[in-house]
Amino acid sequence: MIPVVAQPEPANFDARVRRKGLKYLKKKGFPLGKPLPPKADIPPYWRECLTDLHHSYTGICAYLGVYFERVMGAGSVDHFIAKSTNAGLAYEWGNYRLACSTMNSRKGAANDVLDPFYLAPDLFRLQLSTGHIYPNPRLAAKARRLVEDTIERLRLDDQQCRELRVSWYQDYLEHGLPSDYLKKKSPFVWHEANRQGLL
């Protein structure tokens, strides 16, 4: 993971998502700032902004740090603070993180994942030859545990994630890809290769 800069909400977001969502919550008597009642089902108006979210964050999954194509249906709106925890944030742009479907599913309603919007630089390190992700060894114990919890929760170090990162770096090496292209498509791999002086 690498820090993600929060982007401003689209001009039509309020009309397309927020107002409709808040109207529904009011109609149902669901208080803002409180958890949703058990098994409550609310309309997914946030899906209306998925294309805008993909565009605003240049198609990069906030957790994997890799580009995915919008047309493939692989993207989703992750509510960083879960809808079940705070009903009012279900329809707030500032609570959305662009995530691939796999990462969104793994995160679920968990609250032990570091927020990409408030991520300090260089918390995560990468072994480029194997794709292994791990905490910066210079971190203090508390910070290291937070990084470890995030890696564990999202399973960022599973075999598939490792292979994905390795494939991007190997493609860069074997096909002579421009480093700017690697940065655009796999910014976490680019960041680590650059930090290690391998670009």
Image (cartoon, rainbow, N blue to C red):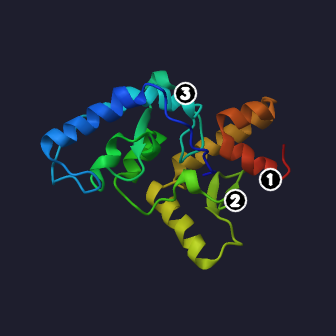
Q: Which residue is mark 3?
A: 55
Mark found first going from the N terminus, 1 or 3: 3
Reading the image, the residue beneath label 2 is 122
Between the residue at mark 1 and the residue at mark 2, the CA separation in whole angstroms equals 9 Å
Q: Which residue is mark 1?
A: 195
Q: From this viewpoint, is residue 59 visible?
A: no
Looking at the rendered structure, the kind of residue marked 1 is Arg
Between residues 70 and 91, which one lies in front from this camera angle?
91
- Left/right placement of residue 163 relative to residue 110 reads right
Give amino acid for label 2: Asp
Residue positioned 56% across, 76% down in the render:
142
Q: Position of residue 75 (x, y in %)?
A: 45, 33
Q: Are marks 1 and 2 in contact (CB under 8 Å)?
A: yes
Q: Tell which residue pokes out farthest to the bottom in this image.
A: 141
Residue 100 in view of the camera? yes
Q: Earlier in the sequence, mark 2 or mark 3?
A: 3
Secondary structure of the residue carrying tag 3 is helix
Q: Residues within 10 Å of mark 2 (few under 14, many from 20)?
A: some
> Badge 1 local density, few (<14 within 10 Å), some, or many (20+)?
few
| Secondary structure at numbered mark 1 | helix
- Left or right placement of residue 27 versus residue 107 in this view: left
Quadrant location, the C terminus: top right
Residue 169: x %, y % from top left: 72, 41
Residue in the picture at 57% in, 35% down = 57
Single out the mark in the foreground, 1 or 2. 2
Q: Is residue 17 above or below residue 90?
A: above
Q: CA distance from mark 2 to mark 3?
A: 26 Å
Q: Residues within 10 Å of mark 3 (few under 14, many from 20)?
A: few
Q: Quadrant of residue 176?
A: top right
The image shows residue 183 at horizontal and vertical percentages of 72, 37
Return the x and y of residue 20 as percentages of the image width and height. 27, 31
